[in-house]
Image: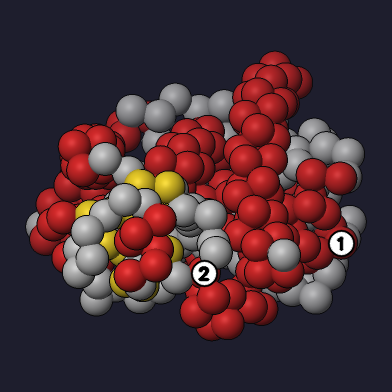
Amino acid sequence: MEPLSLLAADIGRSREEAHLQRVSRYADPYLARRSAGQKHPVEDFLFTYYTQKPGQLRRWHPGAGTVLTDEQAALRRSWKHYRTLDDGELAFLGLPAGSTAVTFDRAAFLADRKDAVAFAGIILRGTAARPAQFGCFGLHEWAMVYRQDKFDLRHEYLQLRLGAAGTDKVVEDNKIRCTHFDAFRFYTPDALPLNELTPTRESQRHLEQPGCLHANMDLYKWAYKLLPALPSELVMDCFELSWRIRAMDMQASPYDLAEWGYPAIPIETPQGKAVYVEHQRAFAAEASVLRERLARELNAVTAWQHS
């Protein structure tokens, strides 16, 4: 029998309410801006770049092996990758026959998400095993606007802090060492050959390294792709780290975000580079802990499949 633990109804409700409040802090302002036709260059990113939408993020999941009852169970009976407990499982947990109780449907999840689970494991384990690199200085954002006409900028409503010529000079005066394909793929055509590497989707599993801001932001992506196998609290831990990384990434970008409340980290100077690396190292340390937690949860889900 699959190992299961019963979550007391009051604790389940408390955890779900805490999760909803945590999500609302980020999702509510985004939804209000969207309704008003407004944009935010930093705080919209996690809802527009990644595929997890606010409504999906609000859904609280207790994680694999946890049994819910009462109204929480009734609601989740129709949710994908949940299953209703059989009478034998109900009896084992001391629940009356005919009770409404649900848990994560491990078998269906692994059958449906086999490739995604395997790839997430490769990325998480491979990234953790490599040495961190701290010499990129956030130049990927600069390469995305290199020799680009203003009207073609990715954030057309923002101003370049150093102007077009000054931005191009920063790119030309520095080595660009981006290892992350999902940053590299947004480079302008003139910037592509300036990168020391040529990341591809195929080489991602070999290049991801734990110093990369975007690799650490993507912990949120791997977390939500593994729902509902993971507890939503872990997903939100990854979300909040990604949120803070995005803020620093844009502070180090070529855009002038002072009026948005984000002072520049001038990576074109030695002092700015030092500040960037200090933040980058701190984020890498936080991400290392979350990456280990994700890998541990994933291992637990897949290990039961083979037990």
Task: Report crowding for label 1: few under 14, some 14 to 19, many 20 or more residues within 10 A (C-alpha).
Answer: some
Q: Is residue 276 above or below residue 202?
A: above
The outermost residue toward the top is 271
Question: How was this image coloured?
Answer: secondary structure
Q: Is residue 75 visible?
A: no
- In this rendering, position of residue 74 left or right of residue 103: left
Figure quadrant of residue 249: top right
Residue at 54 percent across and 82 percent down: it is 112
Q: Is residue 202 visible?
A: yes
What residue did someone put label 1 on? 206
Q: Earlier in the sequence, mark 1 or mark 2?
A: 2
Q: Amino acid at mark 1?
A: His
CA distance for labels 1 and 2:
29 Å
Percent of width and height locating residue 262: 40, 29
Residue at 69 percent across and 40 percent down: it is 292
Q: Quadrant of the N terminus?
A: bottom right
> Which sits in the foreground, 100 or 23?
100
Q: Amino acid at mark 2?
A: Arg
Residue at 69 percent across and 20 percent down: it is 278
What residue did someone put label 2 on? 106
Q: Is residue 152 above or below residue 10?
A: below
Q: Is residue 1 above or below residue 40?
A: below
Foreground mark, 1 or 2, reads: 2
